Amino acid sequence: MQEAKWQECVAFHGHACPGLAIGFQAARAAQVHLGFGSAADEELVCITENDACGVDAVQYLTGCTMGKGNLIFRPRGKQAFSFFVRRTGEAVRLVWKPTDLPEEREAKMKAIVEADPVALFEVKDPTYDVPEQARLFRTVNCENCGEGAAEPFIRLQNGRQLCVDCVDAYSRGW
């Protein structure tokens, strides 16, 4: 069963690699900790702190996707994944533990895939709450480029509604 799911993740992602293996095991560990399989809608949410290969395995195995709004990218550059079950309020944050893995790529990937998924991650509580469900927003046309953008991504500058790409950024070093 595990090998078949791994091969399905590889087919979805396009190639086998250690990064995909990490996401594969993160999804499996989350399923163990939360007792939850795959989400048809937004009942399971994943916040990923990286945009690496492993996110594809998380999508494939958990049903959390950007399009449904239950896969959220929180850029931190960490191999960390927080999962939330909306119905029960259960949550878990899984942080990749440095492990004694082989250096060679194929051997490393094989060792990750064959390991106990729970043993590969530090288990923590997320430091933030489950995000609200995805909302639909009105589209506003940027008065500079003319492209439509969701209302929360429109800024008012000099009386004009501008998308975040056209607005002059304001920064004072923060």
Image: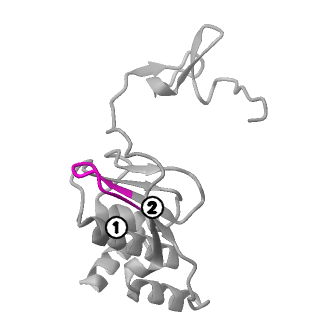
Q: Amino acid at mark 1?
A: Ala
The residue located at (46%, 47%) in the rendering is: 128
Q: Is residue 15 left or right of residue 88?
A: right
Quarter in which the N terminus is drawn: bottom left
Mark 2 belongs to which amino acid? Phe
- Reading the image, the residue beneath label 1 is 30
Bin the neighbour count of mark 1 within 10 Å (Cα to Cα): few under 14, some 14-19, many 20 and up: many
| Whether label 1 touches label 2, CB < 8 Å | yes
Left/right placement of residue 3 relative to residue 75 reads left
What's drawn in magenta, residue-wise?
83-92
Specify whether residue 15 is in view: no
**Which of 112 and 14 lies nearest the eye of the viewer?**
112
Q: Nearer the viewer, residue 53 or 13?
A: 53
Is residue 116 part of the magenta span, yes or no?
no
Q: Quadrant of the C terminus?
A: top right
Query: Where in the figure is residue 149, as x and y percent of width and height?
Result: 47, 27
Total numbered labels placed on residues in the image: 2
The colouring scheme, among rainbow, by chain, secondary structure or one colour, is: one colour
In the picture, the disc for residue 81 is: 2
Question: What residue is shown at x 38% (from left), y 68% (from top)?
Answer: 57
Q: Residue lying farthest top?
A: 159
Q: Residue at x 59, y 11 (%)?
A: 160
Name the foreground residue: 167 vs 36: 36
Dot 2 falls on a residue whose secondary structure is: strand
SS of the residue under disc 1: helix
